[in-house]
Image (tube, helix red, strand yellow):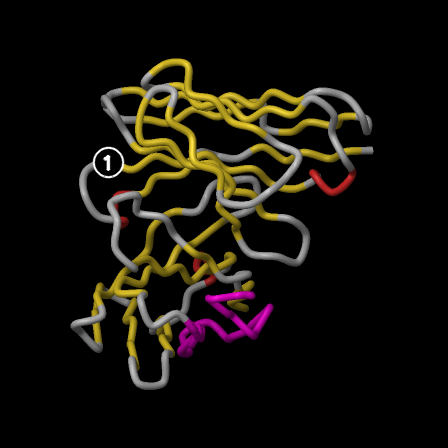
């Protein structure tokens, strides 16, 4: 039972255009969502996050949108750059407790073409 | 500074052989520690987490075990590897409160042949 779903395994975008990566979740107890970026042979690095009390969080070229009613979040990258090419993981946390466990999606491989 | 070390980077092991992956953290004390695995075609799956020395919680039944013999050391082990144990193993630690503080190691690519 996959609680965090990234249904697009890959996405290809032209440099300068917008990249939109999508993520859906099923667990209503999730209250914090994160996006991680991963290059080959490296561990994921934190990119941006959003709390369930917000519907938007922006950090430079990266914006995350949260639609709680649809249990959907998306990451927008504008403008996309070749260096953004990586695997992007959506992750969620919540449900109480202090163990801060993350549930990840399968990831989306973003390729930004020059 | 706070860093996380994970080794080896790659490992090829025959079926039935033992496994020991080590993760150490520097520059902090009493961190939460985590082992994740990404198998082919799947997302990162939490295997074990530890909130202190000797305290291990297992998330999924499997052929692996974990131990935390020291505050900043987290070890993933197996007595006999299976083909299905192949994957990319990541250690992570949490600094401070809140999941935003997760920091991952560089990972170990394990191939069981």
Quarter assignment of residue B81: top right
Q: Residues within 10 Å of mark 1 (few under 14, many from 20)?
A: some
Seen from this angle, which residue lies furthest top?
A: B70
Q: Is residue B74 above or below residue A105?
A: above
Q: What residue would you read off at disc 1?
A: B95
In x, y percent, where is residue B33? 37, 32
The span picked out in magenta is A1-26
- Left or right for A95, reference B22: left
Determine if the magenta segment contains residue A2: yes
Q: Nearer the viewer, residue A16 or B43?
A: B43
In x, y percent, where is residue B76? 54, 26
Q: Is residue B10 above or below residue A45?
A: above
The mark tally for this picture is 1
Query: Which residue appears at 24% of the width and 36% of the height?
Result: B95
Where, quadrant-wise, is the N terminus of chain A in this rendering?
A: bottom right
Q: Nearer the viewer, residue B104 or A92?
A: A92
- Chain letter of mark 1 equals B
Q: Is residue A95 above or below residue B4?
A: below
């Amino acid at each position: 039972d996959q609680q965090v779903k990234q249904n697009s395994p890959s996405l290809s975008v032209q440099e300068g255009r917008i990249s939109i990566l999508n993520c859906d979740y099923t667990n209503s107890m999730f209250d914090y969502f994160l996006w991680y970026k991963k290059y080959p042979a490296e561990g994921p690095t934190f990119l941006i996050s959003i709390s369930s009390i917000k519907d938007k969080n922006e950090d430079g070229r990266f914006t995350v949108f949260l639609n709680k009613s649809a249990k959907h979040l998306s990451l927008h990258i504008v403008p996309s750059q070749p260096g953004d090419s990586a695997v992007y993981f959506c992750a969620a946390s919540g449900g109480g407790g202090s163990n801060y466990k993350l549930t990840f999606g399968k990831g989306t491989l973003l390729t930004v073409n020059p | 500074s706070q860093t996380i070390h994970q080794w080896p980077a790659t490992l090829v092991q025959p079926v039935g052989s033992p496994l020991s992956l080590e993760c150490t953290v520097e520059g902090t004390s009493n961190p939460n520690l985590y082992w994740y695995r990404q198998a082919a075609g799947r997302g990162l799956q939490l295997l074990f987490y530890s909130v202190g020395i000797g305290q291990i919680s297992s998330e999924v039944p499997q052929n692996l075990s974990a131990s935390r013999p020291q505050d900043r050391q987290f070890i993933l082990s197996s007595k006999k590897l299976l083909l299905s144990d192949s994957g990319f193993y990541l250690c992570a630690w949490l600094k401070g409160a809140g999941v935003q503080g997760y920091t991952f190691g560089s990972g170990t690519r394990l191939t069981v042949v």
